[in-house]
Amino acid sequence: MSELIRTIVGRLRAVVANRRHEPRKGLRLVCSVSLHDPKAKATASASTRRAPSLECHTRDLSATGLALVAPSIRVNDRYLTNTTLRLLLEHPAGTLEIIAQPVRYEQLPPDSDETGYLIGVHIISMSDDDRIRYEQHLTRA
């Protein structure tokens, strides 16, 4: 029942108001999503271990956020929807690391071309070099 309500609210939101402030570019890029652990870089043993991740792709991108299509909303037993995420975006100029916060999700309809979940994320941070490459790609697309 809650998925039905979430779907109805998502469709209503699209009809009533588009709250996005930045223009979106429809770009499909491969992306690896894992749970962000800020402590992982602090210890050498933790940084050498590969965190469990989920292979996704982008539906669209903007300067402030991305829409991801994911086969699931969980990595192992943890939900992607209520925690900070680490995205490794396979960008034409090289892999970009993005720290993002999910802001919404919905299950894609069964008659859709894609299956799984659409997850909207807000970009929290990325390195200065990654930000430059990311924004340059947006302006060219």
Image (tube, rainbow, N blue to C red):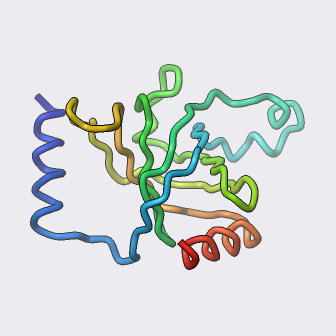
Q: Position of residue 19 (x, y in %)?
A: 26, 71
Give the quadrant of residue 4: top left
What residue lies at 18% left-to-right and 33% top-to-bottom?
3
Up-down relation of residue 25 to residue 45 (above or below) = below
Asked whether 51 or 131 is in front, the reply is: 131
Up-down relation of residue 7 to residue 49 (above or below) = below
Asked whether 2 or 45 is in front, the reply is: 2
Number of numbered markers: 0
Q: Position of residue 116 (x, y in %)?
A: 35, 32
Give the quadrant of residue 110: top left
Q: Residue furthest top?
A: 77
What residue lies at 42% left-to-right and 61% top-to-bottom?
26
Asked whether 81 or 120 is in front, the reply is: 120
Q: Is residue 25 left or right of residue 94?
A: left
What residue lies at 38% left-to-right and 52% top-to-bottom?
120
Asked whether 104 or 94 is in front, the reply is: 94
Up-down relation of residue 59 to residue 2 (above or below) = below
What residue lies at 48% left-to-right and 43% top-to-bottom?
83
Up-down relation of residue 55 to residue 21 (above or below) = above
Q: Is residue 24 left or right of residue 95?
A: left
Q: Position of residue 80 (x, y in %)?
A: 46, 37
Q: Position of residue 101 (x, y in %)?
A: 48, 53
